[in-house]
Image: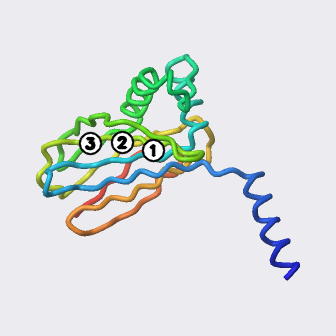
Amino acid sequence: MFWIGWNTLFTAFVALMHPFFVSVIDINHNEKEATIEISVRTFTNDLEKMIGVDAKTTIDLSQASQKNKADALIAAYLSKRLNLSANGTKCKLEYVGFEIQKESTWTYFEVKNCTQLNQLNVFCEVLFGINDQQINIFHVKAKNTRKSFELIYPKNTTQFNF
């Protein structure tokens, strides 16, 4: 019993000493609505740091008084760092909004007028510059199939075929 408690404590300590540098990007093709729905999950402090570097400003995403500024800065930053092409055509990512859940920020985008998704090309440099161990994990769902892929820094492109 003591060993299990110590092992758990040790694991938690190691996790604190070696933080994760991960974002998760979920992409779902909604055939019924002819849209691609995108959600990007990042650690809030990392996103604030990279927005600061990119826009040469500071932002506290948790402050309601900075909501309009946060929306503009998040949309600008992520639109530069995440690009998609569906079936060979560059997608226009429309910013929907963001929300904070504990230490994470979820940011939402939508691509309209995509009736079919046979091929998705991804360019992603989300949070590149935070740490050389940055990993961007993709989960893409189309045609009732889910595929996943990890882009590990410095790799910034991948392709999904359905």
Q: Which residue is mark 2?
A: 108
Question: What amino acid is labelled 1 in the image?
Answer: Trp
Q: Which mark is residue 110?
A: 3
Circle 3 Cα neighbour tier, 10 Å, few/some/many (<14 / 14–19 / ≥20): some
Instruction: Please provide percent x and percent y for residue 114.
Output: 14, 48
State the separation of the CA atoms marked 3 and 2: 7 Å
Is the C-beta separation of discs 2 and 1 under 8 Å?
yes
Q: Is residue 155 above or below residue 139?
A: above
Is residue 52 or residue 160 the one in the foreground? 52
Q: Residue at x 22, y 39 (%)?
A: 91
Circle 1 Cα neighbour tier, 10 Å, few/some/many (<14 / 14–19 / ≥20): some
Q: Is residue 123 above or below residue 77?
A: below
- Label 1: element kind: strand
Q: Which mark is residue 106?
A: 1
Residue reaching furthest to the bottom: 1
Q: Residue at x 29, y 61 (%)?
A: 141
Is residue 121 or residue 54 the one in the foreground? 54
Instruction: Please provide percent x and percent y for residue 62.
Output: 55, 32
